[in-house]
Image (tube, rainbow, N blue to C red):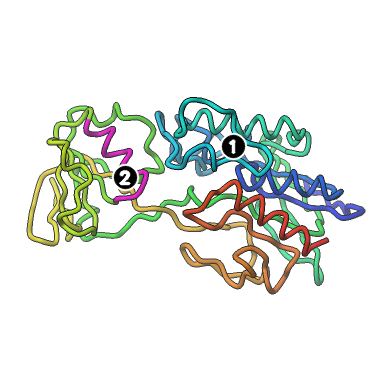
Amino acid sequence: MKECMILRGMKVVVIGAGCAGLCAAKNSIEAGLDVVVYEQTDQVGGTWVCREEVGKDKFGLDVHSSMYRGAVTNLPREIMGYPGFPMIEGNRSFISSEDVLKYYNRYADFFNLKTSIKFHHSVLRVSPKGKSQWLIVVKDLNYNRTATIIFDAVFICNGHNFCPLIPQYSGQEVFRGVQFHSHDYRHGDIFREQRVLVVGAGASAVDVVTDASKMADFVVQSHHWKKNQNIFATVSLVQKYPEISHLTENGVVFKDGTEDTFTMIVYCTGYRYSFPFLTPDCGVTYDQNYVTPLYQHCININRPTMAFIGLCQFVMASQVADMQARFALKFIT
């Protein structure tokens, strides 16, 4: 069933109820706007929600979360909260993903945001209507119903850690072992009695290597740092190899000619931006990790009633997202 509604007053749609979406909704409500948040899953928190499922969810959609058991923040909690709403004090600065998720739920409850969130609603299409409005096609996943709704402004808050970036190597198709991206990693039990190659040197790679070293028979980390930079040098089980040249049926050949056998390869190689719901006439283009043209990495220059919140990486995410939301609202209103 399809229906078209013309909403009265200044109507704002927020796509996603994670870190960026929650503060976009909170600030929009405080600005006196009529806010609807569409969240594809059943709860707030975005990538901080740890789910056992990988691949597709029960609706046949790609699982969004990349969270794994035992994850701990790589920023201290003292700088992770939204302005004016600090995290609960404790003895630990680096806290669990569960504690971060509790914080976002506490924020949503304190500001009564969940009454504005439509859970299990997937945005299928965002397209411009006239000079400043937007047509949003959204699907109620529980009832398999689609609606087309007009909004005056749109906040894109669907995150950037859900669409895996997997490097391509010759021989990947013939390797007989298991290959997967860290997006699908959930717990270290899968490494038991395996010969594991971890590709990458970012935060998730460090966690995966640490977990694998407790369970696997043999662990190698491959990355393009200088050869003498091995952060796991004190862990005898973990070896550092250079970049991959190609894969074979039973292992990997590296660029220095080294060859070894593996039963499992984990690609901790980051993510690309993905906005599959945006039509070409929205006025922006994106390629892997760059969206253009945006003013201050936030406002769509061609159609400024659209704002992207939370694209910046290697920042204090909650604080930057909140600042971007308030900045965009000042411009829009």
User: Please, what is the three-letter code of the amino acid marked with disc 1?
Assistant: Gly
For the residues marked 2 and 1, what is the alpha-carbon distance in whole angstroms? 22 Å
Q: Residues within 10 Å of mark 1 (few under 14, many from 20)?
A: many
> Any magenta on residue 203?
yes
**Horizontal and vertical percent for residue 194?**
18, 33
> Residue 328 appears in which quarter of the rendering?
bottom right
Q: Residue at x 37, y 45 (%)?
A: 203
| Magenta highlight range | 201-213
Residue 45, numbered label: 1
Foreground residue among 230 and 146: 230
Q: Is residue 199 above or below residue 304?
A: above
* Main SS category, magenta section: helix
Residue 250: percent from left, percent from top = 13, 45
Nearer to the camera, 134 or 138: 134
User: Dot 1 lies on which element?
Assistant: loop
Residue 53 vs 173, above or below: the answer is above
Q: Badge 2 is on which residue?
A: 205
Kind of residue sitting beneath label 2: Ala
Looking at the picture, how far across and down is residue 228, in whole percent? 15, 54
The x, y position of residue 106, in whole percent, is: 66, 29
